[in-house]
Amino acid sequence: MATLLLDTLRKAELEQYYNSFSTHGITQLESLAQLSMQDYNSLGITSIQDRKKLFQLVQSLRQELPTLENGLVSSPSTISSAITSPSTGSLLKSPQSYRRRPPEAQKTQPLSVSAIPDLSNQGMPRRPVNVNVSGVAAAGASPQTIASPNLSTPQTRSRSRTLPDQAARPEFLKAGKQSSIILPEDDDEDTSDEENKCEIRRGSGSLLDPYGVPIQKRPGYSQRSNTLGSSPFSTSVTSVASVANVSAQSDLNQKIRVCVRKRPLNKKELEKGEKDIAPTVGVRSINVNEPKMKVDLTKYIEQHSFTFDDVFDSDSSNEQIYQRTAQPLVKYIFGGGKATCFAYGQTGSGKTYTMLDPQHGLYVLAARDVFHLLRQPQNEHLTAWIGFYEIYQGQLYDLLNNRKKLFAREDGKQNVVIVGLKEYVIKNVEDLMQVFEYGSQARSTGSTGANSDSSRSHAVLQILLRPVKSRKKICGKLSFIDLAGSERGADRGDADIKTRMEGAEINKSLLALKECIRALDQDKRHTPFRQSKLTQVLKDSFVGNSRTCMIATISPNQGNSEHTLNTLRYADRVKELKGERDRRAVGNDLENGNGSRVSGEEADFGNDESYQEEYNDVDDDYGDSDDPELYNKGDDDDLFLDDEYFPSDGDVNILDEDFPHENNHRVFNEPQQAHSRPANANSSRRQNMYNDRSGSGLLQSRTNPATDQGRRISNNQNHSPHNRTDEPSFDGGMSSSPEIYDSIEFSRTRQTSGPLARPKISRDASAHSINRSQSSVSLNDFAVTSLPNKQPPPVPLATKQPEQLTSEDVLFEQQAIEDFIKYHRAQIREVTECSKKETKLLANFSLSMSSRKDTQENGGKGSSVYDLQTSSDFIDYLDHLAEVLERKMAAIGAMRDRIRSVLGEEDF
Ligand SMILES: Nc1ncnc2c1ncn2[C@@H]1O[C@H](COP(=O)(O)OP(=O)(O)OP(=O)(O)O)[C@@H](O)[C@H]1O
């Protein structure tokens, strides 16, 4: 085969690259035929002439080796694999010639050199030869390469990353080469037969996916397919029946499932004579035949192919979709879990119809099952509650409570709680539908009043399971989310400031959603949940013990092909999340305590007690969410812990490292603390705290380093265990009152972190004090320069020889220093966050001003109206700015306190 390759290269006057090809594992013509132009550089082919030659050679080889074509026609070995695979039952007959042949047999039937066209004259046709989709070369193919007449039109086509011939691909291309399949339209624009006369050539196969992510880093298709229990060949040559079989075997209990639903062409589209350009292929794949035009104005169709957990054709009913999307989630929440089902797609693609249609929406079908399960004896102790809110412009509004503003909170256990959300007990489906209808009206009414419309908000309907006897506990939560239309930002095209801001917010949140999913997919240690309210609220759907199902809705008409592709790419990105690479995926959850796997059924319905306990604990902390006053003491921002962090993936970002979730961050994120405090609050707080505690041991602890035992080096003889027990415990419970909170912070600053500030001076710490000899903070900067009465002065640390140093001389423990660093990071983060808010406030205000000016100049309303509006906005702007600045100052003040504490300063 190598000789054949060399001969071929020689004929094409490319033999000088033979070594480079070999180095890259290209030793066969089949491999050569799969090169795309993006590979040329890696192979060292930079001269234009040579690139042309290679391009023509590759084209010619593809023509000569149709069975290797990228996805349209499978290689003999692949086809035979598929045929012989027990998991797939091809519709194809299995001609002898496509049975799996032993390698030797393959070797004995190489293509003859004569079959390779002589390219040395460069006279080969530029236009690739048309072949039909069954892989039969239209012209010029050697008899050997013409597919068997029995090779009927494949049931599916797939993009190159589903290439069945991965095994034959060069090593460096195997990881995930992507290409497109370009099908030219006939010049006479008769597209009816285009599928039978498709021009096949490798498209601009890129090593980057549409999101700019190197494909090599992503799991190969076959890996994912295997994860799902299907054959890696299933999408390339399998029949509908076999795919259905595979799909049926796939795990409905995966942590994340991604499905696609195509709506039918609507009346308008039909009237316009539009065609369905997104045929589904089997039950898991869908193609999009995107009309395109070359620079020479030749029209062609670019076909894109995608595979998901499920693809629902336009004739699928909500019931069918429900069975494979939300129904497993309903079962899951009865095991104590959290689950989310959301619809994503462009406006008019059927999100609402799917999720929240008043009659057949998935929520109604889910409710039916919820009540069915509630009637089971084992669930008699539970009741169902409903809450319905929307996220509009980054704010939460209760749709069941006059659009009351809500606040999201997160506890230390990463549960998101919507504080103040009005929830109703529902006894049956009718109840639910009534409540929902009421909420929907509020949504549209409210949004009309606010100059928005429903599709510009994300609507969240949640069904909660609570014990009959304790409405405080939550035993399961299922959320249905109807996301705002995904294309609004791009399509709005109007100058209205509000609309633009809405669009920007929607885009931001959808982008954030994608970023979060992407971060999870790539196992990044930092997941940017905080980037939008949507992702903050959805956070607990992604982390921990949760299930998520995304339904990407698409419109099938040509006019929407771009949007459809965007939606599918987005969904495809999400799809990458699942599979064995995701350590939070089902595999983890299915591990029982002994490390062995339990069955899906068990995992599904088994009670996750630890989770439930946690969840219930949380709810206890929060109490009843009907009572917002209990938790919402005037703060005007949501409180979340930091974004999700996962152990190392090599990202280096000081703000992203080991961010303290609870211990340190909350001090900055407590708006109550920040907003209600006057500008000099830090010093007065310090003074108050000092006064309050001067007689209570804390002062003593400050003046007596011996009481600061917690973090001191272990061999300090003066450690007094009882002093350690004096430390106030702080669990950072969110239910803490501000006063408690303050005291917690104080104690944290003064005591828990205090030891950090306690340079160890001598064994008799009771009488010691310290001075900072220099202003900069470093270990060696701390030396004892004065000591109280009757104590012999210690040897200054700086003068000690290294061999004289003992552990007693260590001023700060490593841990304490690390804690300080974490604290500092938290402070930087908080200040940065505030600065961003400041910028945003300023941008929004100036944007609205300039927009108003424009309108005025273009003959809008009288100037006094605008001046009035501007003044009112200005006041808002100042108000918000003042709040942000206070929060910022609070963060800086807390940091200063901490430094002083560390340095043992006596200024408060
Ligand atoms: N699968 C379907 N079968 C029949 N009609 C559908 C289907 N999906 C959507 N429709 C119809 O298409 C129209 C638009 O659907 P829908 O309102 O659900 O879109 P949407 O994605 O929620 O839009 P928006 O983002 O603007 O809220 C509706 O009239 C709806 O009844």
Image (cartoon, rainbow, N blue to C red):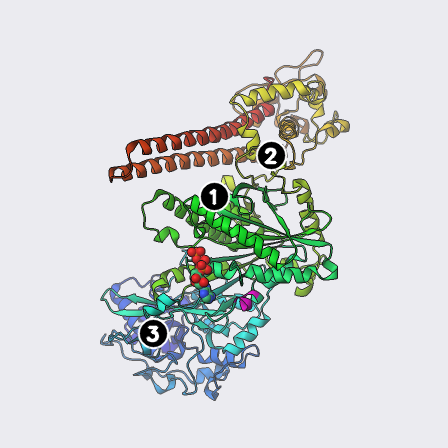
Q: Quadrant of the C terminus?
A: top right
SS state under label 1 = loop
Residue 417 in picture, x, y percent from top left: 60, 45
Position in image of residue 636 (x %, y %): 52, 35
Q: Are marks 3 and 1 in contact (CB under 8 Å)?
A: no
As for residue 567 lying within the magenta part, the answer is no
Magenta includes 319?
yes
Horizontal placement of 295 versus 105: left or right?
left
**How would you classify the magenta stretch by its main secondary structure?**
helix
Q: Can residue 193 be seen?
A: yes
Percent coordinates x, y for residue 308 in the rendering: 50, 66
Residue ID at (52%, 54%): 481
Q: Secondary structure at mark 3?
A: loop
List the residue tagged with mark 1.
394
Residue closest to the eye, 627 or 833: 627
Which residue type carries mark 1? Gly
Q: Which residue is mark 3?
A: 200
- Amino acid at dot 3: Ile
3D distance between C-alphas at marks 2 and 1 = 33 Å
Q: Amino acid at mark 2?
A: Asp
| Range of residues picked out in magenta | 318-322
Labels 2 and 1: the sequence-earlier one? 1
Which residue, given by chain and number where applicable, does mark 2 sit on?
819
Query: Is residue 148 or residue 879 the one in the foreground?
Result: 879
